[in-house]
Amino acid sequence: MTKPINTTGSTTTPVHKRKGSWGGTVLAVLWAFLGVRRKSDYEDDIGKLNPLHLALVGFLATCLFVGGLMLLVNWVVANP
């Protein structure tokens, strides 16, 4: 069986079979939070990382960020 070919002509791995590392996924999400990423690195991440892992790590990172902001605000308001 042949691998699917994307629009650029290179072969891609099906989404459910991508074996990207959790560390690489966390790093990609953190770069996304900052909003700075080279296009070549972004395309490399898209080809290697599992979108379900990206969504899970993104959700957890967002929860941690919002929780951290809430703790910071409560601490600032509580201290005169």
Image (tube, grey):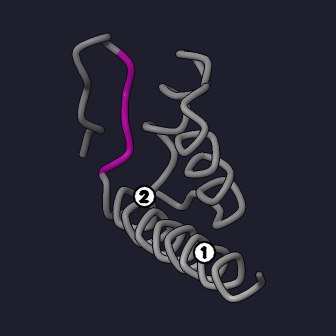
Q: Residue under label 2, please give it.
A: 50
- Count numbered badges in the picture: 2
Q: Residue type at mark 1: give it.
A: Val
Q: Residue type at mark 2: give it.
A: Asn
Q: Residue at x 22, y 15 (%)?
A: 7
- In the displayed structure image, the side of residue 48 where residue 34 appears, left or right: right
Q: In this picture, is 57 found above or below 33?
A: below
Residue nearest the viewer, comparing 41 with 4: 41
Q: Position of residue 10 (x, y in %)?
A: 38, 19
Is residue 11 part of the magenta span, yes or no?
Answer: yes
Is residue 76 part of the magenta span, yes or no?
Answer: no
Query: Mark 1 or 2 closer to N-term?
Result: 2
Q: In this picture, is 67 found above or below 58?
A: below
Q: Residues within 10 Å of mark 2 (few under 14, many from 20)?
A: many
Q: In this picture, is 70 found above or below 31?
A: below
Q: Residue at x 50, y 68 (%)?
A: 57
Q: Residue under label 1, please give it.
A: 73
* Outermost residue to the right: 79
- In the displayed structure image, the side of residue 52 where residue 64 appears, left or right: right
- In the displayed structure image, the side of residue 33 where residue 5 appears, left or right: left
Residue nearest the viewer, comparing 18 with 46: 46
The quadrant in which residue 46 appears is: top left
Of helix, strand and loop, which one carries label 2? loop
Q: Position of residue 3 (x, y in %)?
A: 30, 38
Of helix, strand and loop, which one carries label 1? helix
What residue span does the magenta drawing correspond to? Answer: 10-14
Q: Residue at x 60, y 46 (%)?
A: 28
